[in-house]
Image (spheres, rainbow, N blue to C red):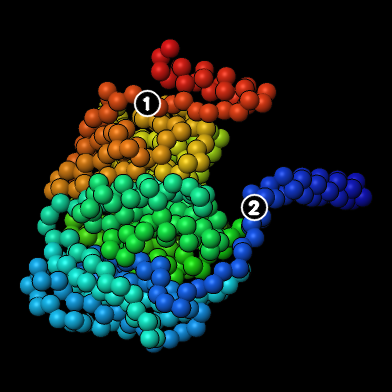
Amino acid sequence: MKRKTARISAFTLAVVLCLGGGLCIWKWDTWFHNPPELPYATPHSPDRIILSLGEDARTERTVAWRCDTFLQAARVEYYALPDSNMPAVEPLYTADATGTVVPSRAGKSAFYQARLGQLESGHAYRYRVCCGNTHSGWHDFRIPPAHDTLDFLYIGDVQDKTDGNTGQFFHLLREAYPGTAFWAFAGDIIERPTDAYWSYWFSSMDGIPASVPILAATGNHEYLKGLPKTLDTRWTHTFVNPGNGPQGFEGQTYYIDFPDLRYIVIDTDGIQGPVSLWRHRNWLKTTLASNPKRWTVVMMHHPVHSVRSGRDNYYVRWTFRPLFERYGVQLVLQGHDHGYSRITTKTAEGEKTVPVYVVSSSSPKTYRIGFDPIHDRLGANLQLYQHIRITGDTLHYESRTYDHQLYDDLLITSSGTVIDRAGDIPEQLDYPFGDSPEEREKARAYEQEKNARQGR
């Protein structure tokens, strides 16, 4: 009996090893392959200047930049512009910077950061960064008024090629929305963590991050593949966020407080095991339970309910959705799936309420969506952005195409009422399939599901 049991155990082990090996071969590129990074040189003067928000968005900003490959004395010089109540003296304030030499697979850069504190709501400031004997040009930013309308832009995955048209898109956004409090990105702003893609993103932004605070979540494309995956250190030193997150995720999972809004960002891609998941769950529960603000918005890369066909982020749904519902989160902004979805929570009577879950993408790379009826609104093969405005008891959510055509329109009240104003806007569900037999079969199945949704 013992020999038979041993033979069965050996056979079982061999089967498991074979299946595991086959799975690793099949998923090698997805799980382990990182494209090579070409050597790069860091300029001798400051570049990649980016403005981030402190935990208290009313009084704090952080400026980050890179300069050369070794550490030098660095600082930020800044002063209040004449339209504020403080005199314009150059420089009125100096904030010393701390620096770190950050290596990558193909080079290194010295990154710096400086915190600007005791800023005043409604005031405008001008600053420049200084590094050794060099300095940048002057940049302006404004602290939003304490009790006024707060509006911002939400942008899903960017993930463009280095010869793409993202720069034109960002230019149009800057022209259309000059007064936004910040731009929010839900991860995958780059195709892969190489300096060429970082350069492309910054060149596409064309100086916007130096004047408009950037609020960012990590995406899987900012991580280097492996066991475990590791976040590109350039992300950490580019987006200098508050360190109020769970243990081991400081600056990656965090929250920022505005006068009437708590904005929570979760690093879903960094959750790679039960310990980090449990820490996030406890941290989120505490952060929501202690929230004194009228409005709560959560941003993360992986959706609670995926819109891409065949995907299911069950750990996100099981862990976070009950907390979102229990503590009345009004809006959850998500990416990853390169399609569009808007889901409203339903009451027992079938009425729409919060949380509202949104998945969006601005990337030219699009994926085939699924047609689960849980999605109130769907979109395929679209590049979108979202403009969100909070005024008192009302949040106005709009999703628009690159040419500013309205695609989704929603009003949410702080009490949880949701008013859907997109009923007369047709859904864009067409998707381009290839011409292989397999693709033609997928296209037929997709067309059947699309026609069923449209009642054909």
Identify which residue, 82 or 344, lies in the foreground.
82
Q: Name the element at disc 2.
A: helix
Q: Residue at x 23, y 77 (%)?
A: 78
Q: Nearer the viewer, residue 328 or 450?
A: 450
Left or right of 160? Residue 63 is left
Q: Nearer the viewer, residue 322 or 156?
A: 156
**Residue at which label 1 appears:** 427
**Residue assigned mark 2:** 31
Residue 73 in which image quadrant? bottom left
Residue 401 placed where, x, y %?
Answer: 34, 37
Q: Position of residue 367 (x, y in %)?
A: 52, 36
Residue 438: percent from the left, percent from the top? 66, 26
Is 425 left or right of 276, judged from the image as shown? left
Residue 447 drawn above or below residue 317: above
For badge 1, the amino acid type reads: Glu
In the displayed structure image, the side of residue 79 where residue 300 appears, left or right: right
Q: Amino acid at mark 2?
A: Trp
